[in-house]
Amino acid sequence: MKLFDVYPLYDVTPVSATGSKVIDDKGKEYLDLYGGHAVISIGHSHPHYVKRIHTQLDQIGFYSNAVKNPLQGQLASKLGQLSDCDDYQLFLCNSGAEANENALKLASFKTGKSRVIAFNNGFHGRTSAAVAVTDNSAINAPLNQQQKVSFLALNDLGVFTNEIKKGDVCAVIIEAIQGVGGLDEPTTNFFQNIAKLCKENEVMLIADEVQAGFGRSGKFFAFQHHKIQPDIISIAKGMGNGFPIGGVLIHKKIKASYGMLGTTFGGNHLACAASLAVLEVIEKENLIQHTKDISAYFKEKAVSIPSVKRIKGRGLMLGLEFDFEVAELRKKLIYDHHIFTGGAKNKKVLRILPALNIDETAIDTFFIALQKALA
Ligand SMILES: Cc1ncc(COP(=O)(O)O)c(C=O)c1O
């Protein structure tokens, strides 16, 4: 059987990895500044992570959500403590799209309404409602287009106010830093006003923290830079450092009932062990402070490169904007300099999403290579 050919592939075959280094099948070493789409949060094969998953696997890897699994409660407590989100309840699932799917469903259950406000260039996943609120017609099948969604410009408060006042909106879904779109952000004024308008109009505010969450922005959640409180928060990528896990943080004002949400695999023993290991490393190694420090170091270096027109993003969710499309530059970086970086919907943005424990030496290596690749 052949694979369903949906991914254009770089000609690289990784076979092992540690920290921010990836080794291919020919023994060539790569510097990973992309973490496989912002997934690698504590570095590849972190010893604590490997040990915790091994130990868990020796005990029990999976049982369904029909029985008690104390690891889920431990994960919820640790997450509440580190994120300062103790007023929320946790539902565990398997991916970012599934987290958003459940978040949107909850908003609709809670409000009895069905239209969603989403934003231009937003990305929320590829499943039914998640893809419908994603601004990319190429991945939105006729089936998905049946959902009622209004895409608005970020930071246009007038248009937003008109839309939300129509009375049929169940949810507003927003990324505090747009990932796939190219690192654009709502202003604090816009974010605070939409949070207020959501409250006044009984609309659920969903913060999609699938990419920006788990410390990547230099705070546990990126919306925390704006001092707002969403009703629902979706999480995934950095949560499992590569182990598939997602989740939804649901404000305590939204009451659960049996059967309202569900999943076979979500919250299994191995996934919980992986995510607990991530949180323990973030805490023990003080990775959120490190993220802020290394981000400042990166930005300082980036300003000295004349062809970088704009430095976008926060923490280690960064974008370098050029006045040309970066596809060729990414190829040079990967094939000539052995560095993984990312692209975005905005084709002039080079995305940098390293592990949160990357060091200054790796950043220096990147900038030396970037200068050579640009020469
Ligand atoms: C902000 C955001 N939300 C949701 C998703 C979808 O996550 P997944 O690919 O795990 O379904 C992504 C993936 O890139 C994302 O960046």
Image (spheres, rainbow, N blue to C red):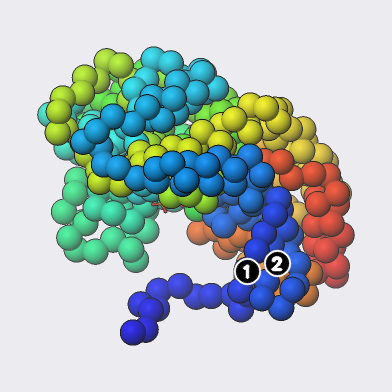
Q: Which residue is mark 1?
A: 14
Looking at the image, which residue is at 48% across and 25% down? 79
Front in this rendered view, residue 3 or 136: 3
Is the Cβ of the residue at disc 1 closer than 8 Å to that at disc 2? yes
> Dividing the picture into quarters, in which one does residue 204 lie?
top left
- Left or right: residue 94 versus residue 255 is right
* Count of numbered badges drawn on the protein: 2
Q: Is mark 1 within 8 Å of ligand 1?
A: no
SS assignment at label 1:
strand
> Dividing the picture into quarters, in which one does residue 3 lie?
bottom left
View extreme (bottom): residue = 1
Q: Reply above or below: 185 against 120.
A: above
Q: Earlier in the sequence, mark 1 or mark 2?
A: 1
Q: Reply above or below: 142 against 305.
A: below
Residue 340, visible in the rendered structure: no
Rendering coords of residue 295 (x, y %): 73, 38
Rendering coords of residue 108 (x, y %): 18, 33
> What amino acid does circle 2 point to?
Ile
Give the position of the C terminus as an image quadrant. Answer: bottom right
Q: Which residue is mark 2?
A: 23
